[in-house]
Image (tube, grey):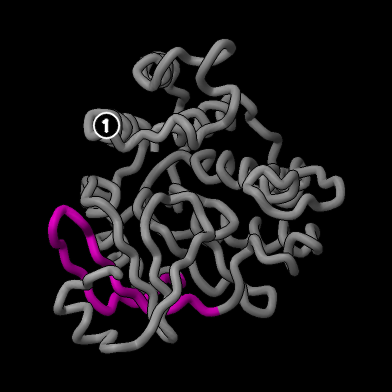
Amino acid sequence: MIILPKCIQAITGTNTYELDSIGMSGSSILKFSNSVLKIEKESMESNHEYEIMKYLKNKLPVPDILCHTKENGNNYLLMSKADGQMLCDNFYLENPDKLTNILADALHMLWNLDISDINNYSYNMGINKKLEMAAYNMEHNLVDIDNTEPETFGENGFSNPEALLDWLIQNKPKEDLVFSHGDFCLPNIFANNGEISCFIDLGKAGIADRYQDIALCYRSLCHNFDGAYGGKIYPPFQPNILFQKLGITPDWDKVHYYILLDELF
């Protein structure tokens, strides 16, 4: 049984909850009837999520914050429940053309957010800040090498996270800055009647290169369709259609870089 802080209990009362196992964030997600509680170890990322969600209110469709507190080394973030369905829902995976249209709309919604008035350094999620966060994760044993792409570490990959971080530092690409979700994967985007209804899991959101989101979206599409996340294997699908919907020619070097960077989170 999970014992919740008193300020959280004051809102949830004796209501029952279910644990949400979808996603790969490593946090505990408790789903109540009309709210969601996210519990995770205190870190740069979990501290940032609360601040960026306050900033994004009325700017993007994000959950309302009902309560936030820290206790015993954990962050507790109680939020309103997202409206609609996750984009990893069977309905969308069985309709890839509709899915990629919504994903392209969601990316453009993020990129169209005016970043000219964002002066808070903590909202900077560019490469240097991400590398700083990656180093923090390594120092605090928050990197799970068992939860990475098979080829990232080992005989044909990097010897350890330190070697990967060194490579990332030495091979930083030029940035094209926009507002970035930071973890743009199918379970973190909700839609209702074909329209974007909510963005969740915003601990890495802020100003960053647009390929931060493109790369993770591409990876998420690949693995949600090929069954790598332990789900159903769907009929053959070409994830490159995402680039067609975005109207861009893919920069595969950047796709590769940002997928590797995410291995340290």
Q: Residues within 10 Å of mark 1 (few under 14, many from 20)?
A: few
| Residue occupied by mark 1 | 132
Total labels: the figure holds 1
Residue 188 in percent (x, y) is at: 51, 60
User: Magenta residues, as a range?
Assistant: 61-83
Image location (x, y in percent) of residue 37: 34, 71
Q: Residue at x 40, y 17 (%)?
A: 160
- Quick one: 50 or 142, which is closer to the camera? 142
Which quarter of the rendering shows the N terminus? bottom left
Q: Main secondary structure of the magenta part?
A: strand
Whole-percent x, y for residue 145 in the image: 44, 30
Residue 79, image quadrant: bottom left
Q: Give the residue displayed 59% in from the left and 12% down from the top.
A: 156
Q: Secondary structure at mark 1?
A: helix
The answer to whether any part of residue 129 appears in the image is no
**Considering only vertical position in the picture, is 210 above or below 138?**
below
Note whether residue 130 is visible: yes
Kind of residue sitting beneath label 1: Glu
Residue 58 is left or right of residue 24, and the answer is left
**201 relative position to 250: left or right:** left
For the point 76% across and 41% down, the residue is: 240
In the image, 31: left or right of 192? left
